[in-house]
Image (cartoon, rainbow, N blue to C red):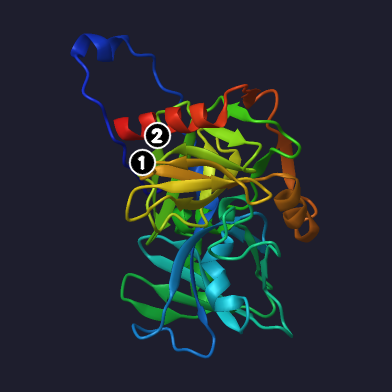
Amino acid sequence: MRKFALFCVYCLFSITLFAAKPTPEPVNENAFLVQKEIAVWPTDKTYDSAVSVYNCQSVRLDSNWFLTSAHCVYSACATRPCTVEITLAESNSLLARARVRHSTTSQSVFIYKGFFPGQNRISGMDVALIKLNPQKAEYSYIDLEDGNPITREVFQSKLRFDPEAQAQLNAKGVRLLSVANMPTIQLKPKIVVPKTMAGVVSYLPSLSAEVYYVEALQHFIAPGFGVRPGNSGGGVFTRSGDLVGIVSSLLYSKDGTASFHDEAGKTVLTLQNADDVFLFTGFNGTTLNFIRNKVPYLRTVSVLPDFAVKSNKRFNTIVKATEDTSLQF
């Protein structure tokens, strides 16, 4: 049986009110099997406790391409060779990983060119792609029942009797919701943020409808609802399994304030209480074209009209609603 864990923040209701609540839309947990753990480090360092390893998430778009956040790979890969280790499957009995080597002469990590850490609009362009070349990747297999490495042939023979590992290995492909050329919109479906660790997929469903794609920012803004470091690079899904975006960041500062900036760098609004506002990268015109240039058979569908409605709310009204909802969680 596939392993899932669900973590929610529940409000306290009376029995009567609880009984009167409509049944929430079910979550398609199988859709989250495309989410994979990745570890990234400079190739000239040894993967041990002494090296800075960036542990993030990724989404497997097809057999050879993984989508993640640019900030997960930038420090290790932007100016030097790096190694990306992808956990392809991890069940109770089997573990399969692939190591991808990146360098200027053999590129495997592609970072959106407009991205630079610390900029004002990080969440609008926080995307990167990882290419898994089956002929060049270094694969490793472990029998988790005794902790010993095994050959590919032994792994394949044991895989026939491990449906969980099979499901993880075969999971690939997802439909992206495009916000290219969109005005400010409000999502209709609730969003879900999964996280894969040690073969277990946990997920955080937002209970709020206050999720917006803001035209001036070119990224999404939503209540934090428990999303924390370690989710970076993973998917933001609808409950039915469509990919809305990629986890970018929360807003943290010593004094609790944060400023939002438009494409020109002009300050749009400064929050006085920004802790728990969740930002995530959507598939706008530039990020979608960046992905399509590498993954030409990408499945996409416009977010309007089935998945969102246009919103005439002013930006400060959107932020206030998002912040108020986040505090309820």
Q: Which residue is mark 2?
A: 323
Q: Position of residue 51 (x, y in %)?
A: 40, 83
Query: What residue appears at the point 39 percent right and 18 percent down from the top-left corner?
Result: 23
User: How many numbered marks have been drawn onto this rendered protein structure?
Assistant: 2
Residue kind at label 2, given as amino acid type: Glu
**Image: 124 above or below 38:** above
Q: Which mark is residue 29?
A: none
Question: Which tag, 2 or 1, sits closer to the chain's start?
Answer: 1
C-alpha distance separating marks 2 and 1:
8 Å
Q: Are marks 2 and 1 in contact (CB under 8 Å)?
A: yes
Q: Which mark is residue 273?
A: 1
Name the secondary structure under disc 2: helix
Q: Position of residue 185 (x, y in %)?
A: 62, 28
Q: Quadrant of residue 138?
A: bottom right
Q: Residues within 10 Å of mark 2 (few under 14, many from 20)?
A: many
Q: Position of residue 21 (x, y in %)?
A: 34, 13
Q: Position of residue 34 (x, y in %)?
A: 55, 52
Horizontally, is 264 left or right of 20 in the view? Answer: right
**Is residue 40 visible in the rendered structure shown here?**
yes
Horizontally, is 104 left or right of 166 in the view? Answer: right
Query: What residue appears at the point 37 percent right and 54 percent down from the top-left corner?
Result: 253
Horizontally, is 168 left or right of 224 in the view? Answer: right
Residue kind at label 1, given as amino acid type: Asn
**Image: 322 above or below 164:** above
Horizontally, is 179 left or right of 236 in the view? Answer: right
**Is residue 98 visible in the rendered structure shown here?**
no
